[in-house]
Amino acid sequence: MKFECDVKIPGDDEGKTLATTRLVVLVAPSKPMCKIQGTAEYGQNINLTCVSAEGSPQPTYSWQRHNVQNIPQPLPAKATDKNGLLSLYNVSMETSGYYICTSRNKIRSEICNLTLTVMPPSMNIGSTAGIIGGSVAALLVLLIVIYCCCCRKKEQPEEYGVPEEVAFTDKEPIQKQGDPRDDRSERSYDRRDRREEGSEVNGSTIDRRERYDDRGSDYSDRRDRYDDRRDRYDDRRDRYDDRRDDYDDHRERYDDRRDRYDDRRDDYDDRSERYDDRDRPPSVPPNKPKRTDYD
């Protein structure tokens, strides 16, 4: 803010009658806000932002990194820190840790921190479960259709072919005039022919039954292969669940360490505030000896 002072003396035209001055009010930076922009997954590019709403003169920002044991670590390779914006490229598990941003001007400094946990892309359970569920449902529908077709073929009656020459009727054949022994011999030959033709018909029926048994065995083999694939899928799913449980345990331990770090940092802030209160020395030293009179 600029102030001007104008002095006017009647009859005095010499000297400087106008003076200006500038007033600058210093404001300490407010507590900055730390945020993560982007998805913290393997191979992604993310940004860490740090901004103070107030501060005069304009505060400057700087980032620091600590590991789980609260040991300072250098920033990841290819990371850029510009005016409170920390850009991280191709993040991985080693990029995880505690990040501390310091906002500083001529009066004092303020800090904010955040925890960056980089997750593997396979933890996207929703999409993976949807794909697996759709595949299993389609396979089950296909098996149901195949089973219904086999049952329908089984229920259809088999057509037994009867030769046109052999016609079974209730009417007795007209006997020809002649020797009755010749008629008996002809009847015996007809019965023998009918037996042979019946055996041929039964043979075709047996062939059809064998083909049906072969189809049933093929279906059983397919069902066994499907059961084997389903067992392998169940084993893979169990291994995936075990890995997910291990990751959850690791994340819980990581959160516990982060909580302990936050508690330690709060204690440190309290001690620093008490130390700031004790910066001004007392008027009388506490260990000054008492004055004695030697009268």
Image (spheres, helix red, strand yellow):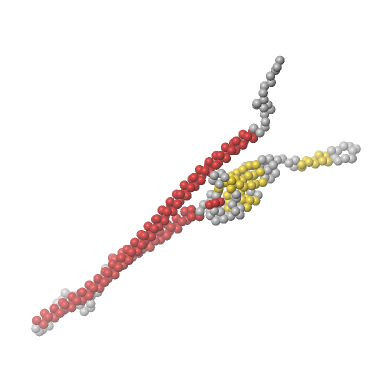
For residue 218, what is the image quadrant? bottom left
Image location (x, y in percent) of residue 5: 81, 39
> Looking at this rendering, what residue extends furthest in the right direction?
11
Image location (x, y in percent) of residue 32: 62, 44
| Residue drawn at (26%, 72%) of the image | 207
Left or right of 60: which side holds 91?
Answer: left
For residue 54, what is the image quadrant? top right
Left or right of 96: which side holds 164?
Answer: left
Q: Is residue 223 above or below residue 281?
A: below
Q: Is residue 115 above or below residue 196?
A: above
Image location (x, y in percent) of residue 196: 19, 76
Q: How many marks?
A: 0
| Residue drawn at (31%, 67%) of the image | 215
Image location (x, y in percent) of residue 238: 41, 53
For residue 22, what is the image quadrant? top right
Query: Is residue 132 something that shows in the picture?
Result: yes
Q: Nearer the viewer, residue 292 or 70?
A: 292
Looking at the rendered image, the quarter that the C terminus falls into is top right
| Residue drawn at (13%, 78%) of the image | 188
| Residue drawn at (65%, 49%) of the image | 83
Looking at the rendered image, the quarter that the N terminus falls into is top right
Left or right of 26: which side holds 168?
Answer: left
Q: Nearer the viewer, residue 112 or 16?
A: 112
Q: Is residue 284 above or below residue 118?
A: above
Q: Nearer the viewer, residue 186 or 243?
A: 243
> Looking at this rendering, what residue extends furthest in the top direction?
295
Query: Is residue 167 something that shows in the picture?
Result: no
> Looking at this rendering, what residue extends furthest in the bottom direction?
178
